[in-house]
Amino acid sequence: MPPVNRPQCVETTAMGAAYLAGLAVGYWANKEEVIKNWAIDRTFTPEICGEKRDEMISGWNKAVKCSYGWAKED
């Protein structure tokens, strides 16, 4: 598994919309200017072996299936 980079600004959906709007109206000249504003806060490196990860994901999927219909009114 590759490392995961967490950006300094975790509100990426709002930030993406703002960047696109800024590009559309000429606030930023090009996407390279936008890229300069992006910075990594922290990098996470997976430490769980593949077999253990698969086991945990299987358990998660089982729990999700057990929750189907949980909030339905009787």
Image (spheres, grey):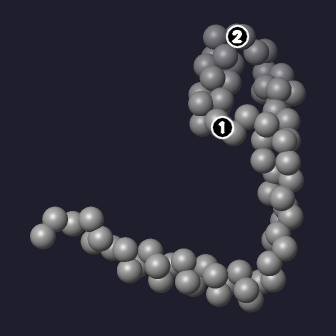
Task: Give the class, few, some or many, for how many residues have Cα within 10 Å of label 1's Cα (few <14, many ≥20).
Answer: few
Q: Is residue 15 above or below residue 44?
A: above
x and y percent of residue 57 in the render?
61, 79
Q: Earlier in the sequence, mark 2 or mark 1?
A: 1
Residue highlighted by disc 1: 12
Residue 16 coordinates in the image, percent (x, y): 64, 32
Q: Residue furthest left?
A: 74
Q: Say which of marks 2 and 1 sits in front.
A: 1
| Closest to the observer, 23 or 6 | 6
Residue 68 is situated, as x and y percent measured from the top left of the image, at 33, 73
Residue 16 sits above or below residue 51 on the image: above
Using the rendered image of the protein, determine whether residue 32 is visible from the camera's viewpoint: no
Q: Nearer the viewer, residue 29 or 67?
A: 67
Name the amino acid, label 2: Gly
Query: Where is residue 37 drawn, in percent x and y?
Result: 82, 26
Determine which residue is flagged by label 2.
26
- The residue at 66%/37% (across/down) is 12
Give the residue displayed 82% in from the left and 69% down from the top. 46
Which quarter shows the N terminus? bottom right
Quadrant in the rendering for residue 33: top right
* Image-based side of 11 in relation to 31, left or right: left
Q: Is residue 67 visible?
A: yes
Is residue 15 rendered to the left or right of residue 8? left
Residue lying at the far top of the rendered structure: 26
Q: Secondary structure at mark 2?
A: loop
At x 67%, y 16%, the residue is 22
Q: Residue at x 76, y 15 (%)?
A: 28
Quarter of the image with the C terminus is bottom left
The part of the image, by quadrant, that contains residue 30 is top right
Discs 2, 1 touching: Cβ within 8 Å: no
| Badge 1 element | helix
Q: Which mark is residue 32?
A: none
